[in-house]
Image (cartoon, helix red, strand yellow):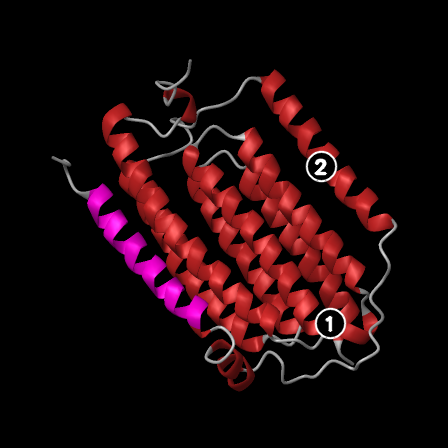
Amino acid sequence: MITTYLFYFLSFLAIMFGLMVVLSKNPIHSVLYLVLTFFAIAGHYVLLNAQFLAAVHIIVYAGAIMVLFLFVIMLLNLNKETEPHKSLWLKASAAVASGSLLIVFVGALKNATNIPATNVANPNVGLIENLGKVLFSDFLLPFEVASILLLGAMVGAVMLGKKSIK
Amino acid sequence: MSVVQTIPINWYILLSAVLFTIGVLGVLFRRNAIIIFMSVELMLNAINLLLVAFSTYLSDSKGQVFVFFIMAVAAAEVAVGLAILMSVYRNSKSTDINTLNKLKW
């Protein structure tokens, strides 16, 4: 019973903080609300028995990516005064468009057949031992390609960040 | 009592759809390029949540491995994207996407 309440609570937090990311005027507040959203999603991962992924999620997203965002925002000195705004007409059409998208999603979900939770889920699926075995046997080539991608991203970021590209 | 028995997977699909829609709303709603990046992150996280939910409900750890790869791609995207944003700011002194209209026909 407690898991049900926990699910509702975490979902509420994730959706509310997600909306606050979009709606808050100050970019710094947006970043902080996004961190809270990520924590709510990490709570969902724990609820889904993916403990290792929850830890990695917090380290990578809340620890690394969000710090990068915060660093750039403070470096560029963005604040409430410099924040550009769309016209009311464009904002309304954006809300209508994304609302229609949500209606499409919900409509597609309405007739979906529910997956019966017959096989009582193996609680070891999300543990590091299991994931490591799968990652280094079935997904060895994608793993290496991901390392090349990260190297390329690193070189690209350094290239773009240089003062002047001659 | 695990979550698999108490909550149908449709709830997770619905939650992911709502989070994804919030991300789309952010991309359409804001003009600051950094907020748009953050909305893209939110969309990626909605997909991650969906993958983890299916992986748990089907007792298949491949979905969770896929989430690792999405995280790697997201990290690379953010590093390069923010570097591009910095050089844009250096040239136009703002992160407003409406100033980036030089290629507009």
For residue B57, the mark is 1
Q: Where is residue A92 in the image (x, y as percent from the top left)?
A: 65, 23
Amino acid of disc 2: Leu
Secondary structure category for the residue under label 1: helix
**How many numbered dots are placed on residues in this image?**
2
Q: Position of residue B5 (x, y in %)?
A: 82, 75
State which quadrant residue A43 falls in.
bottom right
Which chain does the numbered disc 1 sit on? B
Which chain does the numbered disc 2 sit on? A
Tell me which secondary structure the magenta stretch mostly adopts: helix
Q: Does the magenta stretch include residue A154?
A: yes
Look at 73% across and 40% down and name the residue there.
A102
The reply, left or right, for residue A120 in relation to residue B99 is right
Q: What stretch is highlighted in magenta?
A: A141-161
For residue B102, the mark is none
Q: Does the magenta stretch include residue B29?
A: no
Tell me the quadrant of the picture where the C terminus of chain A can be found: top left
Q: Rounded to the nearest whole Å, what is the CA distance between mark 2 and mark 1?
A: 26 Å
